[in-house]
Image (cartoon, rainbow, N blue to C red):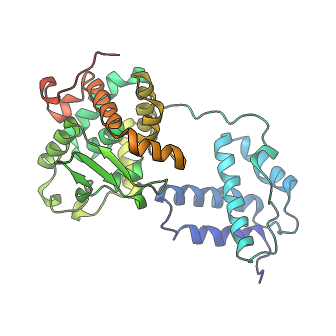
Amino acid sequence: MADMRTVGQVVTWWVERLETNRSVSDSYRRTMASLMRRHVLPALGKVTLKKLNRSEVDDRLVWPMQQTHSPHTVHKALQGLQQALALAARQNRIERDPLAGVGFRDFWSGKLPPRPAGLLPVDAPALVPTLCAAFERNPLAGLLALMMLAHGTRIGETTQAKWQHISMIDRVWIIPSQNTKTKQELVVPLTQQVCALLTRYRELQHEARHNSQWVFAMQGGKPLSATQASKVFAELSGGAWTSHDLRKLARTMWAEIGVDYLVGEMLLNHSMGKLAGTYIKTTVNQMRREALESWHAWLDERGFAEAHGLKNNETGFSTKAA
């Protein structure tokens, strides 16, 4: 039975539901809840569902918001509103979805520009030594950044790592499906450099955290939270780049050093479709390891060895500077 009459009622219900939804990441919950409360509710909260249409959304939300925010942010706010309405309609909490069939193209005629990269390939020679120095000062912060740069993993995938997910013998790091954005398990090959880096990390890590199951354990053995991880990167970068920029830099450089496109997409754990996923799993596992070996050799030539401590003849892989 439909029991909601205003946009505000629907959005408030959706946000409260979202904040207890463990199937999505902490960062997504925080971002969407903030957009709904700071922008959608003030603009459209009092509008009745019967009066909600394209022009109301454009006049009250999209057009004013695009004056002060990027198209990506406006798009995300609109997506949240549409998700709230669609879910409420499916559950018969409202009679119908007044924005069914409405898309961002109804409000925005141009292409969404790509987000500017906070890190470029030319930044790597200074970035790598900076992260290695951070590893010596603060092993947890340094390892978090270096693991993300070394593997192109997402911040949530990385911070939720447990020691039981890592096998030094098999040289793999397993990221369970519940920790990935695509809900597909990701098996990350570990190079000799990364194995050495993890070994050094255990040696540098405070003894009180050695018994924690979490790789990135805080005081008391608790895992690093999303808020704490954000602070780590704010301090490391001085606000100049984000954790996601490390992932983007890795992807850019993989292309530069000749990593196969599909191999790169698999390393990032992008959704590849059923056919491509089957092809990749059965034919390119070794190519993934070779790609990371090549990438980590490239990083070695820019200072990565300062953190993991291996010499060139110990890694068994080298490459000329690109």
Question: Which residue is depicted at the point 64% across and 46% down?
Answer: 73
Residue 285, by quadrant, is top left
User: Residue 282, relative to residue 48: is it above or below?
Assistant: above
- The answer to whether residue 176 is left or right of residue 97 is left
Whether residue 188 is visible to the viewer of this picture, yes or no, is yes
Q: Nearer the viewer, residue 129 or 283?
A: 283
Whether residue 234 is visible to the viewer of this picture, yes or no, is no
Residue 12, by quadrant, is bottom right
- The answer to whether residue 290 is left or right of residue 244 is left
Q: x, y percentage for residue 274?
A: 53, 50
User: Residue 121, relative to residue 9: is it above or below?
Assistant: above
Question: Which residue is depicted at the point 65% across and 60% down?
Answer: 36
Quarter of the image where the C terminus is located:
top left
Quarter of the image where the N terminus is located:
bottom right
Q: x, y percentage for residue 161?
A: 31, 55
Q: x, y percentage for residue 215?
A: 25, 54
Residue at the extreme bottom: 1
